[in-house]
Image (tube, coloured by chain):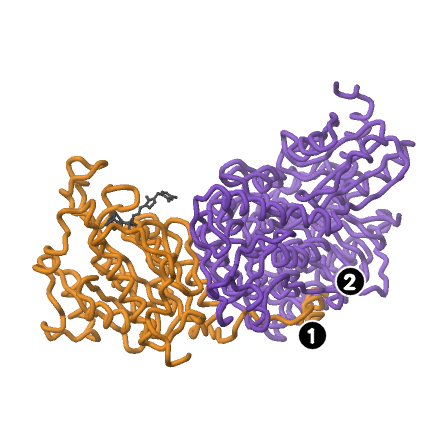
Amino acid sequence: MAEDLNWAVGGEAGDGIDSTGKIFAQALSRAGRHVFTSKDFASRIRGGYTAYKIRTSVDQVQSVVDRLDILVALTQRTIDENLDELHEGSAVIYDGERSWEAEIPDKMTAVDVPLKSLAEDAGGAIMRNIVALGAACEITGFDVEYLDEALEKRFGGKGSKIVENNKEAARAGQEYVQENYDLDHLGYAVETTDNDYVLLNGDEAIGMGALAAGCRFYAGYPITPATNVMEYLTGRIEDYGGHVVQAEDELSAINMALGAARAGARSMTATSGPGIDLMTETFGLIATSETPMVIVDVMRSGPSTGMPTKQEQGDLNMTLYGGHGEIPRFVIAPTTIAECFWKTVEAFNFAEQYQTPVYVVSDLAMAVTERTFEPETFDMDKVEIDRGKLVDQDEVDEWLDAQGHFRAHAVTEDGISPRAKPGTIDGAHMSTGLEHDELGRRTEEEDERVQQVDKRNRKVETAKNEEDWDYREFGDADADNLVISWGSNEGALAEALGYLEEDGIDVRVISVPYIFPRPDLTEEIEAAEQTIVVECNATGQFADVIEHDALTRVKRINKYTGVRFKADELAEQITERLSEEVPA
Amino acid sequence: MSSDVRFTDFKSDKQPTWCPGCGDFGTMNGMMKGLAETGNDPDNTFVVAGIGCSGKIGTYMHSYALHGVHGRALPVGTGVKMARPDIEVMVAGGDGDGYSIGAGHFVHAVRRNVDMTYVVMDNRIYGLTKGQASPTSRSDFETSTTPEGPKQPPVNPLALALAAGASFIAQSFSSDALRHQEIIQKAIEHDGFGFVNVFSPCVTFNDVDTYDYFRDNLVDLKEADHDPTDYEAAKNVITDGEKEYQGVMYQDENSVPYHEQHGVTEDMSEIPDGAPEDAMDLVREFY
Ligand SMILES: Cc1ncc(C[n+]2csc(CCOP(=O)(O)OP(=O)(O)O)c2C)c(N)n1
Ligand code: SF4
């Protein structure tokens, strides 16, 4: 693997850290480099430490590591927070003219740049971060022209004057370092390539997947880290004749989406744990009324409001079991940003094919992380739409009973009934959360109750048989050691394999995007000597279901600090776990 | 749609299980007649119902319908209308459903001015759960859960709607069949959120707000020379603590429904087979 470079900008929330980071990430991506970004942020708008980190390489990168090469520090706290990750070859860019006396350990290279005054000379103090980017370009030997492209993209809408000023600010930073420092000994040289990459995060990929899949109605209520899905769709869905409603709460959001779905539209809502709690009431109704709908849960630390800006995979049980009574459902958890796109497309198809609610479960680490991909990763020609048994006008007659009533909940062999959208003549029917007969009308008849429950559950059985509930696999397929993961841990695990290999440890990694239905891993587990399940929660919710499926005990690696797994840390923990005794 | 639609076409063949004499019979008849008279038919109509005796209405009517969870009928109606501006949407429920558990949604549906008709069957009691106080119960109304009365003033739903910026506010009485139907029709024809609070007496649990009470006390705005487009006049009748009125209290003639304000015109249920043609542009945005 080629040398990777780790860069970060940190300061107070409100310092424009996000946009500074994003501009640099875009510049690197334009230069044909792979980029993987991550954010440290606190749950406040102004004040409080926040950082945007970029790992970049000409090879693919899909995890964070414990190393920082270049740090743009707008506050002392930025330096303190990252001290562990800084090393002898690190360069710290800071503004010595500002009122804080930077304390940077001697062994690192302190690069004092008058960010504020240079920015003022270029047209405004607000551009001090751009001056710092110019300085970073000089230190890393990265052509400042790539920055120009990103600045045009960012500020193009604000007029050419602003773009020019920013370009000037970047050059001022670059030239300042060139004239005042000789940093060749640090040895940073950022290679570029001719590759064209796209850079996007998990929330954006979900939104894009929804649009590609024909989602036309979205209702939501803002919540970190799911809001970006809504922000992405707003302003874009209209191009396709759709609409986004910011509802008054999650109860309303999911019910609006339900209404649109019953009207025949592909419809979706997205939220995080606390919102899922509120939506659970209607979740049962969606399943019982057999309405196709996609519900996205971008998980964050719980329970309750927990740690709103921190990573966790704690909602698995809720999406799997949430709601009173017994609710047939699908739960899909994309394992990469690309999968956020494809699994969302799939979710819409499943929803309509099986007329059930489908959970797409993502997490904060995936939602706020941007990663580069070849544009063909999202090849729209491969998107297929399957609307299931949506009957058109000619087919309605087949589903009428002797009195001419539409049998919207007809008991069928595969458990799937016909669906008529409003406007279909003779298709008018009632749907309800009450137990109902084939026509959708309330019943408490024992036989009818059993038939309807069986019918709804049979859809899941049909799906289990008809669809591929696959997993992704890395490492050595014949290894004695098996590591199983779900959700966003895949990237870190894939990279951890490299470290493990260096230590002579062979591992087979299975990354599972389907929570329910899910692949049966019994054979894989039996073939392995040891199995470890990796997840970002305290109790091992996925490990529990794996143990249940395979009737055996597995080892577990759980992280619930609020921070995602890092590749090197995972490698270490896997090594450690493997040497422990197998649980009885 | 077809001009030969009769109101009985909106009737399902399920016999209502409402108590004999329940006000909901009259409310429902007015709704069915109103729908038929305004040129709708069951296949282009969507009825959303709440939970309660009143909420059972969806079962007794014939159309596309959803009988949802308690208090959430308005958001469902909103979703239907946004996805399908071509469909006639009617939402119905009780005073508990609409002004208690669903009060938040009520305010916001009013404020959005979604083009649908909202009929609340106000019996000033919880019927289905067998006689507890509702948000519109009188403060001294004794029930199983309020033996000395709720000891709090009832909500005034009309005032709530007015404060939220309603574009159509009306009140009717289910046993005044012609007048009720006429008011429902006006609400259906209104471009925007047509709100009708219907006095729909519960003969089993409410012995105060009875047919006789409403017959003797309701003042018809037809006879009061009321101009519904006059906001001040509307405010006066709505906040009049002495008398109760039937009729259209307020109508904003310049009302623009939510979907039109947001430029939603298309039938969202029609989507292409596969990603839209220019969908790669969505990806290129991320260069
Ligand atoms: C979440 C929830 N809480 C409580 C109930 C029980 N419940 C059913 S109907 C009802 C009150 C209905 O009163 P109202 O809306 O006035 O309708 P009415 O029966 O009087 O027509 C209640 C509390 C429920 N179904 N769901
Ligand atoms: S309990 Fe009251 S509201 Fe319910 S059906 Fe009987 S009379 Fe009507």
Q: Nearer the viewer, mark 2 or mark 1?
A: 1
Q: CA distance from mark 2 to mark 1?
A: 21 Å
Q: Nearer the viewer, residue A519 or A206?
A: A519
Chain letter of the purple region:
A
Q: Residues within 10 Å of mark 2 (few under 14, many from 20)?
A: many
Residue located 28% across and 77% down the image:
B253
Residues packed near mark 1 inside 10 Å, few (<14), some (14 to 19) or many (20 plus): few
Chain assignment, label 1: B
Image location (x, y in percent) of residue A433: 45, 49
Residue A469, position as x, y percentages in the image: 74, 47
Residue A317 x/y as whole percent: 59, 37
Q: Is residue B220 left or right of residue B105?
A: left
| Residue type marked 2 | Tyr
Relative to A327, residue A28 above or below: below
Residue picked out by circle 2: A197
- Residue in the image at 72% along x and 34% along y: A534
Amino acid at circle 1:
Glu
The mark found on residue B277 in the picture is: 1
Assign a secondary structure to mark 2: loop
Residue A304, how many percent across, how many down?
49, 37
Mark 2 — on which chain does it sit? A
Q: Quadrant of the C terminus of chain A?
A: top right
Please identify which colour was used for chain B in the image.
Answer: orange
Q: Please tell me which residue is depicted at 25% across the width and 66% down the height of the picture.
A: B169
Using the image as rendered, state which of residue A539 and residue A372 is in the foreground.
Answer: A539
Residue A156, compared with residue B138, is above or below; it is: below
Q: Return the residue found at the far front.
A: A402
